[in-house]
Image (tube, rainbow, N blue to C red):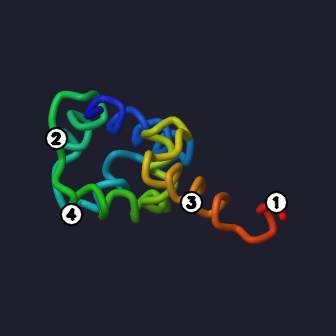
Amino acid sequence: MLNKMGESFKIMRKSRGITLSEATGEEFSESMLSRFENGQSEMSAQKLFACLDNIYLDIEEYNLLVREYEPTDFSTLQKNIHHFYNPTMRLS
């Protein structure tokens, strides 16, 4: 999962033409971000959120990219519950 997180971030950063320096906002080293992107190290949530802001990517979109657009178990459960309890879907 760690590698997928960094890989997804790198793809989005590069697709937007944003440099490592711009992505870090000079709040921490470019080498630290590079190691994260290449699956060689972890990154704190605080730094990741800052980087996501710097590349104009919200956390929900990032999460979908990391999960390869697969819904979470919780969202699947919510969908099933909604479908089951939706009055328009019930048979008379």
Query: Label 1 neighbourhood size at 10 Å, few (<14), some (14-19), many (20+)?
Result: few
Residue positioned 28% across, 28% down in the render: 38
Mark 3 vs 4: CB contact within 8 A: no
Position of 54 with respect to 70 (left or right) is left
Task: Identify the residue under disc 2.
Answer: 42
Q: Nearer the viewer, residue 28 or 71?
A: 71
Question: Which amino acid type corresponds to the residue marked 3 in the rendered image?
Answer: Ile
Tell me the residue that label 4 is attached to.
46
Q: Which residue: 47% across, 59% down?
A: 60
- The image quarter in which residue 91 lies: bottom right
For label 3, the residue is: 81
Across and down, in percent, residue 77 comes to 50, 52
User: Which residue is tagged 1?
Assistant: 91
Residue at disc 1, secondary structure = loop
Q: Amino acid at mark 2?
A: Glu
The mark nearer the N terminus, 1 or 3, is 3
Q: Are marks 2 and 3 in contact (CB under 8 Å)?
A: no
Mark 2 touches mark 4? (CB < 8 Å): no
Q: State the residue lying farthest toward the front.
A: 92
Secondary element at image label 2: loop
For residue 34, side relative to residue 68 (left or right): left
Q: Can you say whether 39 is above or below 73 in the image?
A: above
